[in-house]
Amino acid sequence: MTVTLGGITLSDDLRINGLKNQPQVAGSEQMTLGGRMVFTSCPVTGGRTITLESFRSGDSVYGYFTGTQIDQIAALRDLQTTIALVHHLGTFQVKIKAINVEDVAGVADPSSTSEYTGTITMIEV
C-alpha cells in the first residue's frame, strides 16, 4: 500500500510508532446522589498524536522524505487544514503540527531530491 499525506505520495517504508499503545477509549467516573458509581466510556475519535517516522541505522535508511516532499508538507502545515494520511495501519484525518527532519547526506545546500530522515508529527481530528 502506498503511503500518502494530503495527496503527497511518500516512501512506503515510513512507520507510525506507538499508535497501538494510545488509548482507544475515554472514560469518566461519577457518583450519583444516592452513592452509586456510574462509569461512562466512549471511543476516542480524535486528538491522538500520530508520528510518521523515517530513520537511519548506520548506513541504512528506512523510509525517507525528499526536499520537495518536505516543502509540500510544510505548506500543508502552514494552512492548518485537515488532510488524509493513508498508511498501512489505516487512514486517518490529521492536521500537521511539526516537521523535524535532517538531510541524510549532510550537505550545505541540499536539492529538492535530497533525502531527509526524521518525523512528521500530526494530531488526529
Image (cartoon, grey):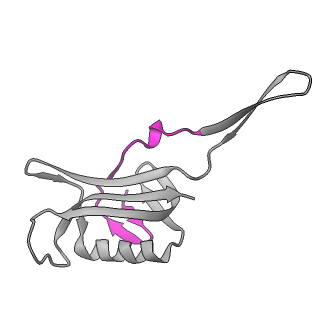
Asked if the stretch drawn in magenta spans residue 9, the answer is: yes
Asked if the stretch drawn in magenta spans residue 69, the answer is: no
Q: Quadrant of residue 86?
A: bottom left
Q: Residue at x 14, y 75 (%)?
A: 110
Q: Name the one closer to the observer, 37 or 8.
A: 37
Q: Residue at x 27, y 77 (%)?
A: 68
In the rendered image, the vertical position of residue 79 relative to residue 40, given as above or below: below
What x and y, as percent, mark residue 7? 43, 72
Report whether 33 appears left or right of 119. Answer: right
Q: Residue furthest right?
A: 34
Report whether 6 appears left or right of 9. Answer: right
What x and y, as percent, mark residue 71? 31, 76
Quarter of the image containing the C terminus?
bottom right
Quarter of the image containing the N terminus?
bottom left
In the rendered image, the vertical position of residue 24 relative to residue 101, given as above or below: above
* Count of marks placed on residues: 0
In the rendered image, the vertical position of residue 42 relative to residue 125, given as above or below: above
Q: Which residues are magenta?
A: 1-24
Q: Quadrant of residue 9?
A: bottom left
What x and y, as percent, mark residue 98? 38, 63
Q: Residue at x 40, y 58 (%)?
A: 121
